[in-house]
Image (cartoon, rainbow, N blue to C red):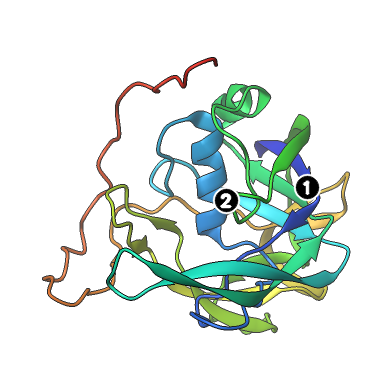
Amino acid sequence: MEVMRVHITGWVASFRNPLFISGFQPTLPLPPLSALYGLLTAAKGDWVTPHDVSLGFVFHSNGKAIDLETVYEFAGKLDAKSNINRREFLIEPELYLYTPDISLREAFERPRYPLLLGRSSDLATVKSIDEIELESQSETTYQNTILPFPDLQLHGQVQALPTHFTAEIPRRPCGTRAYCLVTEAIKYKGEVLHDLEMDWGVYLHERIPGDFSVPIEQGRKPLDKDYEVPKVTGTQTQLPGI
C-alpha cells in the first residue's frame, strides 16, 4: 500500500489523561487519535476527522519529567484565584504519522497553523515527508502505537479515548472507544502492514462511516448517533503586522 510517512519531532509533548480532571496531571505515553486529527487539521487549515482520512502512527520519546503549571480557578465570578498543578510531560518526542491520503503532503510542507504535540506550548516540527510502500505480511511487531481493544493478541494499558471532537463550541468528544496503548513490542499475526525501512508494524485506523456517539451533557438531549461533523468554511483573519 502506498502511504505518506511524516516524521515530526518536538522538545516536549503532553497528552492529557481524561481520567484526571484536577490536581496532578499525568500524560498518556502515546497520543490519542484526537490529537493526531487535530494536528492534521492545523496543518491543512480545515477540519479533518476520521470521516475524511485514515491514519496510523508510531510514537516514542526519551523519558518523562514533571513541570509546575499555573492554573486559574474560576467560581462563577469575574475574579479568579491562582493555583499550581504538577503536570507530567514527555521529553524529545518523535512521531511517525502514516496516511494513504498523499494529497496532505502540501499541508505538511506548508502548515497553515502551528503544529502541536499536545498543549499549545508543545510546538512540533516536520523533519521529513516520504512516500513509501507498506508491505502486506502475515506477521509483524507492533510497538509505540495504539490499537482497538479487545484483541486477544494485545496486552498493555487500556484506555477509553476519543477519535476527534465536534466542530462547534463547546467541543464534544466523538468516536470514543477502548484502545490498547502498546508500549512494549508485541508479535502480531494476521493481515498486517509493515514498514520495511523502519522494521515495525503500522496499524491504519479505518475511516469512520458516520456511526459514532457523543456523551450526553447535563441539560441537553442526546445527539443522534448518525450525527456528522458539519463542514467548516470561512476565511483566515490576518493579525496586524503579519
Q: Which mark is residue 180?
A: none
Depth check: give the residue in front, 161 or 13. Answer: 13
* Residue sitting farthest toward the front: 79
At label 1, counting other C-alpha atoms closer than 10 Å, the crowd grade (few under 14, some 14-19, many 20 or more) is many
Looking at the rendering, in which quadrant would you find the N terminus?
top right
Depth check: give the residue in front, 149 or 230. Answer: 230
Secondary element at tag 2: helix
Q: Which residue is mark 2?
A: 36
Depth check: give the residue in front, 61 or 91. Answer: 91
Secondary element at tag 1: strand
Question: Within the image, what quadrant is residue 132 found in?
Answer: top right
Evaluate whether residue 205 shows in this view: no
Looking at the rendering, in which quadrant would you find the C terminus?
top right
Which-is-in-front pick, marks 1 and 2?
A: 1
- CB under 8 Å between discs 1 and 2: no
- At x 57%, y 83%, the residue is 23
Q: Which residue is mark 1?
A: 10
Residue 18: image location, x then y, percent? 50, 76
- At x 20%, y 58%, the residue is 226
- At x 55%, y 25%, the residue is 103
Tell which circle, 1 or 2, labels the residue nearer the N-terminal end. Answer: 1
Evaluate whether residue 17 shows in this view: yes
Residue 156: image location, x then y, percent? 69, 83
What amino acid is labelled 2 in the image? Answer: Leu
Question: Within the image, what quadrant is residue 105 found in?
Answer: top right
Depth check: give the residue in front, 68 or 168. Answer: 68
Residue 188: image location, x then y, percent? 74, 71
Residue 184: image location, x then y, percent? 81, 76
Count of number-bearing discs: 2
Q: Is residue 237 left or right of residue 23?
A: left
